[in-house]
Image (cartoon, rainbow, N blue to C red):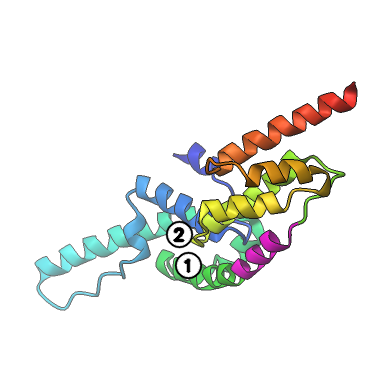
C-alpha cells in the first residue's frame, strides 16, 4: 500500500477533481473513506458498559482519522502540505480542499472554453502535435463534466486546421461518414505522413 501511495501523483493545486478521485480510491482500499463524512462519536453520558463501547468507537475513529488525514496530506505537494497540515481532522481537511479547489475549477472552465475556441493551428508546427494539444483541452472538458458533443468538437478542430490544409479540410467536411475524434486523428496522421514523404522527394 505504501508503494502505491508513493506512485500517486502529488496534488499541486490543479486538476483537483482527478486527484480527488484517485485519492478517494486509495482511501477506499484502506477502508477509510467514511472518515471524510463521519463526525467523531460523542462523549458518553450513560452506563459504564456504554462508556466502554463509546470509548472504543472513539479510539477507532481517532486512529482511522489519523491514517486518513496523513494519507491525504502525503498526496499533496510540500507547499500545500505546509498550508493544510494544521487541519483538525480528515473531514475538515477534505471539506477545505473541496471548497477551495472545486470553486477554482469552476473558474478554470471559462479558461478551458476560451483556450479551445481561440486555438489556432499553424503551418510551422506538426499538425498531429497541435491536434493532440486540442485533444488534451477536450479531455479537460470531460474531467470538469462539461459536455461537448463529439461531432461538434470534431467539426471545430477541422475548422482549425492550418491554411495549407485547405483542400484536406474541404474533403473531410464533405465526407458522408461521421468522424469521431479517433478517426480524425488517424486521417491527420496519414495526411501528415504523406506530406512528409512528398517533401522528401
Residue 165: tell me if it is visible: yes
Q: Which residues are magenta?
A: 108-119
Residue located 49% across and 60% down the image: 147
Residue located beneath label 2 in the image: 69
Task: Specify the label residue 93 is tagged with.
Answer: 1
Q: Is 65 above or below relative to 182?
A: below
Q: Quadrant of the N terminus?
A: top left
- Quarter of the view holding residue 110: bottom right
* Residue 123 picture location, percent across and down: 85, 45
- Quarter of the view holding residue 184: top right
User: How would you rate the neighbour count of disc 1 (Cα within 10 Å): few for under 14, some for 14-19, many for 20 or more?
Assistant: some
Residue located 73% across and 33% down the image: 191
* Residue 96 picture location, percent across and down: 50, 71
* Dot 1 and dot 2 residues touching (CB under 8 Å): yes
Q: CA distance from mark 1 to mark 2?
A: 7 Å
Asked whether, in this view, residue 29 is left or right of residue 153, the answer is: left
* Residue 197 picture location, percent across and down: 82, 24
Amino acid at each position: 500500500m505504501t508503494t502505491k501511495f508513493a506512485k500517486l501523483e502529488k496534488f499541486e493545486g490543479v486538476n483537483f477533481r482527478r486527484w480527488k478521485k484517485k485519492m478517494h480510491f486509495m482511501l477506499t482500499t484502506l477502508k477509510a473513506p467514511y472518515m471524510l463524512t463521519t463526525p467523531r462519536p460523542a462523549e458518553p453520558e450513560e452506563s459504564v458498559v456504554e462508556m466502554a463501547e463509546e470509548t472504543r468507537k472513539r479510539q477507532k475513529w481517532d486512529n482511522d482519522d489519523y491514517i486518513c488525514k496523513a494519507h491525504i496530506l502525503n498526496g499533496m505537494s510540500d507547499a500545500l502540505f505546509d498550508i493544510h497540515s494544521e487541519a483538525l481532522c480528515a473531514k475538515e481537511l477534505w471539506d477545505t480542499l473541496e471548497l477551495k479547489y472545486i470553486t477554482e475549477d469552476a473558474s478554470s472552465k471559462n479558461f478551458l472554453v476560451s483556450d479551445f475556441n481561440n486555438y489556432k493551428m499553424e503551418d510551422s508546427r506538426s499538425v498531429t502535435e497541435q491536434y493532440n494539444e486540442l485533444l488534451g483541452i477536450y479531455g479537460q472538458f470531460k474531467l470538469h463534466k462539461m459536455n461537448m458533443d463529439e461531432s461538434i468538437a470534431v467539426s471545430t478542430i477541422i475548422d482549425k486546421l492550418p491554411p495549407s490544409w485547405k483542400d484536406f479540410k474541404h474533403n473531410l467536411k464533405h465526407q458522408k461518414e461521421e468522424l469521431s475524434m479517433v478517426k480524425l486523428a488517424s486521417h491527420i496522421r496519414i495526411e501528415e505522413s504523406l506530406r512528409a514523404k512528398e517533401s522528401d522527394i
